[in-house]
Image (cartoon, grey):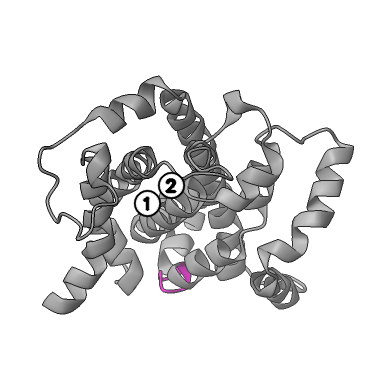
């Protein structure tokens, strides 16, 4: 386990160490394991030479919109599939699951053509709408968790005169906090780092997200290792913080621990 731990954290350590080295130490052979003396000028450059702060704000706005939309629409669909029997429910759920086997690259061109016809190119809508409305993995994950919730809760609420939507937001959602936290973490990390889709749809520099801005540190002739590693270090901080804040619910959601009375 110790060996596996070192192998896992090794690239992260090297990234942070490189971002703190002097310029003439970046490609030194043999390489220095410790950044001595410690240098923060690459971090200063990242926030002064390029609009990193603006990119971080753009990434937060985009990612949180996707997270909130995914949790709402996917949990609503999962509630219907897990607690209600209706005509063709099995077929519809199978169609939703079948979307998981379609690679993202296979749908990029037709989706780009469709979004260009409605003038959504260079906006965040092509990134938000498909991610929130067509997330088969999210529907499947929440549905599996909701199946484990006893139907007695719903029956008691129905006797009290609660509507289906009230049962959904006042009973089911509070009981699904673990799986919702897990899904929020997965969704946040994936779309925070989703370079390909953002590269396809976003053209204006003032709308660049963190992955797009970091990519500008590399051109056809050179690779700015110091600023690239500093930008990458900054980019992983939100995901790391989000994980620690939701760690308790994340572990419960992954193990499907069920309902606590």
- Residue 44, given in percent of the width and then of the height, sits at 30, 25
Please tell me which residue is depicted at 51% across the width and 56% down the height of the picture. Answer: 158
Please tell me which residue is depicted at 47% across the width and 61% down the height of the picture. Answer: 154
Judged by its main secondary structure, the magenta piece is loop
214 lies left or right of 248: right
Q: Is residue 98 above or below residue 129?
A: below
- Quarter holding the C terminus? bottom left
Name, please, the residue furthest toward the top.
48
On whether residue 24 falls in the magenta region, the answer is: no
| Residue under pointer 2 | 170
- Residue 146, given in percent of the width and then of the height, sits at 46, 67
| Residue under pointer 1 | 174
Between 243 and 87, the one nearer to me in the picture: 243
Q: Is residue 40 above or below residue 72?
A: above
Q: How busy is the neighbourhood of tag 1: few (under 14 within 10 Å), some, or many (20 plus)?
A: few
In the rendered structure, are the residues bearing label 1 and label 2 in contact, judged by CB atoms less than 8 Å apart? yes
Task: Determine whether the residue tagged by mark 1 lies in a helix, strand or loop.
Answer: helix
């Amino acid at each position: 386990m110790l060996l596996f731990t070192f192998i896992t954290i090794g690239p992260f350590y090297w990234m942070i160490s490189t971002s703190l080295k002097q310029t003439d130490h970046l490609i030194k052979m043999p390489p220095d394991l410790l950044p001595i003396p410690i240098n923060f000028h690459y971090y200063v450059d990242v926030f002064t030479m390029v609009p990193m702060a603006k990119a971080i704000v753009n990434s937060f706005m985009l990612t949180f919109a996707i997270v909130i939309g995914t949790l709402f629409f996917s949990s609503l669909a999962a509630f219907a599939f897990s607690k209600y029997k209706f005509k063709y429910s099995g077929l519809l759920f199978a169609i939703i699951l079948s979307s998981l086997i379609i690679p993202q690259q296979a749908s990029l061109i037709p989706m780009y053509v469709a979004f260009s016809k409605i003038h959504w190119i260079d906006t965040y809508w092509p990134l938000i709408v498909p991610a929130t409305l067509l997330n088969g993995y999210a529907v499947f994950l929440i549905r599996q968790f909701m199946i484990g919730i006893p139907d007695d809760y719903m029956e008691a609420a129905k006797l009290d005169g609660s509507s289906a939507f009230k049962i959904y937001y006042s009973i089911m959602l509070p009981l699904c906090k673990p799986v919702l936290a897990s899904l929020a973490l997965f969704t946040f990390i994936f779309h925070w780092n989703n370079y390909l889709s953002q590269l396809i749809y976003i053209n204006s520099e003032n709308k660049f997200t963190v992955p797009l801005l970091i990519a500008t540190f590399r051109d056809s002739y050179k690779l700015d290792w110091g600023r690239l590693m500093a930008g990458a270090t900054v980019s992983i901080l939100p995901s790391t913080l989000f994980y620690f804040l939701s760690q308790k619910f994340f572990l419960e959601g992954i193990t499907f621990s069920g309902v606590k009375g």
